[in-house]
Image (tube, rainbow, N blue to C red):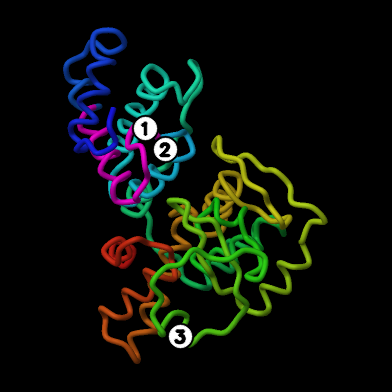
Amino acid sequence: MATFRAPAAQAAYIMKALQGHHLRSVGTVRNYEQGLTRVAEWTQRERLPGGLRAMTPELAIRYLEQRGQEVGQKALDMERQAMQAMMQHVTGQLAHGARIPVIKSEQAQVLTARAYTAPQVALIAAAQTPRHGLATELAHAAGLRAHELLTLRRGEERAADPRPALASKWQGREGVIYTVHGKGGLVREVLLPHALAIRLEATRRDEPERITDRGIHYQSCYDIGGGQRWSNSVSAASERVLGWSTGAHGLRHAYAQERMSELQYTLSRDRALETVSQEMGHFRPEITETYLR
């Protein structure tokens, strides 16, 4: 399949190989073809040579992490299944019986979560084990996702990917630069308050430890909570001390809303929104907007 083919043509080519042999439902074929067309469009935007045939499980995860900021879980799962079928039965990029890990839709989490207040965050952290409590404080202070806690590194140890950055990024805050491996494969800088950075460094491992979370492997440099276990801990602690929980994602809501309040003293709303979007690792300010509801 030539890489210059239009996305729809690439998807149609793949579906011809799948239809009848591996897929019999007309509805599934139609949905998969639409999903693979979107994946092919993404490979063009990302300037990835080879189109759909070059998609690997690693690239699929990267795509799903980006796509999960825009669509709900049902649509995300359908596109994952379409890529999985393609890689297993057409391109051979995935062994039979192997699976692409389920990626959680960030949009779905955002629409159901709401922000904690700073005192509520302190209560939650105090009700957790020390390693989970520290992770909660870090996530709130820097707007981190659950898996990003597992990827923290000092700024001088790993360069961030080149991305647009406003002069107002982290305006009004002081701290130490770290990097995290975020959604869509993006390595971005985050700012940790000095006191939290000191506490984090006290947990530094002699050697990075391989940790698997939701089917994805990470090299974790610090002995702190992160991933699904930490997320579950936040929810359980919140239920104990507050009587309700909005999940770990409520910490990112809190960060977004606190930063917007801080920045709008000196910036226009649009400029503040773009600034917070960059700090949180979103690909568009419109995504950040959903955190302010």
Give whichever of 40, 113 is nearer the camera: 40
Q: CA distance from mark 1 to mark 3?
A: 38 Å
Amino acid found under the numbered disc labelled 3: Gln
Near mark 1 (Cα within 10 A), the count class, few <14, some 14-19 or many ≥20, is many
Is 66 placed above or below 191 here?
above
Residue shown at 31% from the left, 88% from the top: 267
Q: According to the image, label 2 marks what residue?
A: 60
Residue shown at 22% from the left, 37% from the top: 7
Q: Is residue 209 left or right of residue 1?
A: right
Is 36 placed above or below 161 here?
above
The tag earlier along the polypeptide, 2 or 3, is 2
Rendered image quadrant of residue 3: top left
Q: Position of residue 277 (x, y in %)?
A: 37, 69
SS at mark 2 in the image: helix
Marks 2 and 1: in contact by CB < 8 Å?
yes
**Quadrant in the picture for the C terminus:** bottom left
- Residue furthest top as drawn: 21
Q: Per the image, is 45 magenta? A: yes
Q: According to the image, label 1 marks what residue?
A: 80
Q: Is residue 40 left or right of residue 275?
A: left
**Quadrant in the picture for the N terminus:** top left
Is 259 placed above or below 65 here?
below
Q: Which mark is residue 171?
A: 3
SS at mark 3 in the image: loop
Is 206 placed above or below 179 here?
above
Q: Position of residue 75 (x, y in %)?
A: 28, 36
Q: State whether the magenta stretch is mostly helix, strand or loop.
A: helix
Residue shown at 30% from the left, 39% from the top: 39
The magenta segment is: 33-54
